[in-house]
């Protein structure tokens, strides 16, 4: 099966080989045509480092990547992945909550309206303590800060996991937040229709 969408500035093509499409795969495919070498990008929830590495590969050696996680073990795993891929240069790992994304980036002399992409993969660290989860209050604060950072033509991706304790509440809050956004932001919501409590994807574009 092939899914083709032309609702964004560039067509998004996703090939699915006999397995369900993951929201993280879809987030990557929407971001690929948006990013270019030299861009500044943020992984607001580093986790295992997969999104951080993806962003680094998209922006190249001339770009800047900032990766946040509240757990040191997650950043250690992210650094290991980057080291193995020889992609650690120009990546800044920050052990802090994503609610402080604005303060941390301003400290790094990153201006509002200059970040091309921000990725959120909410929930808990895979393989870690499932009791340590992203929470509504700090997540909404982080999303609101990320909006201010986005450049014209920039994009935010938010992967939501309503199947774990606290996840449904967080997903509902994020979707409600997205529904309230006004121009120049456009909010999209993608989800699987025939699964119980499936992961879903919210995408925010800044159009001007």
Image (cartoon, rainbow, N blue to C red):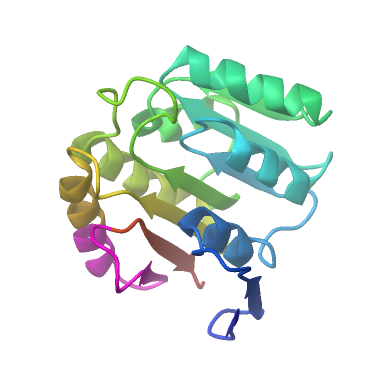
Up/down of 103 relative to 122, above or below: above
Is 147 part of what is drawn in magenta? no
What residue lies at 57% left-to-right and 52% top-to-bottom? 117
Along the line of sight, which residue is nearer the eye, 179 or 132? Answer: 132
Along the line of sight, which residue is nearer the eye, 198 or 147? Answer: 198
Q: How many marks?
A: 0
Residue 121 position, x and y percent, is 43, 44
- Horizontal placement of 84 versus 95: left or right? right
Residue 43 position, x and y percent, is 54, 39
Magenta stretch, residue numbers = 175-197
Residue 136 position, x and y percent, is 20, 40
Along the line of sight, which residue is nearer the eye, 4 or 152? Answer: 4
Say which quarter of the image contains residue 166.
Answer: top left
- Horizontal placement of 22 versus 173: left or right? right
What residue lies at 43% left-to-right and 28% top-to-bottom? 103
Say which quarter of the image contains residue 41.
Answer: top right
What residue lies at 35% left-to-right and 47% top-to-bottom? 143
Residue 183 position, x and y percent, is 36, 73
Is 177 part of what is drawn in magenta? yes
What residue lies at 43% left-to-right and 47% top-to-bottom? 146
- Horizontal placement of 3 versus 91: left or right? left
Up/down of 79 relative to 188, above or below: above
Up/down of 67 relative to 83, above or below: below
- In the picture, which quadrant includes the N terminus? bottom right
């Amino acid at each position: 099966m092939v899914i083709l969408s032309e609702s964004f500035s560039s067509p998004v093509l996703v090939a699915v080989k006999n397995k369900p499409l993951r929201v993280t795969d879809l987030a990557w495919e929407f971001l690929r045509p948006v990013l270019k070498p030299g861009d500044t990008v943020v992984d607001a929830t580093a986790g295992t480092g997969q999104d951080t590495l993806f962003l680094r590969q998209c922006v190249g050696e001339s770009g800047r990547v900032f990766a946040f996680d509240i757990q040191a073990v997650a950043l250690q795993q992210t650094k290991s992945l980057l080291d193995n891929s020889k992609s650690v240069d120009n990546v800044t790992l920050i052990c802090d909550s994503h609610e402080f994304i604005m303060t941390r980036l301003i400290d790094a002399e990153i201006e509002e309206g200059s970040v091309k992409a921000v990725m959120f993969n909410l929930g808990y660290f895979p393989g870690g303590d499932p009791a340590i989860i992203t929470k509504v209050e700090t997540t909404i604060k982080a999303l609101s800060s990320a909006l201010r950072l986005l450049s014209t033509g920039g994009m935010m991706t938010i992967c939501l996991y309503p199947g774990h304790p606290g996840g449904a509440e967080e997903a509902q809050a994020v979707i409600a937040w997205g529904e309230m956004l006004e121009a120049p932001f456009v909010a999209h919501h993608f989800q699987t229709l025939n699964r119980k409590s499936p992961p879903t994807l919210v995408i925010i574009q800044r159009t001007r």
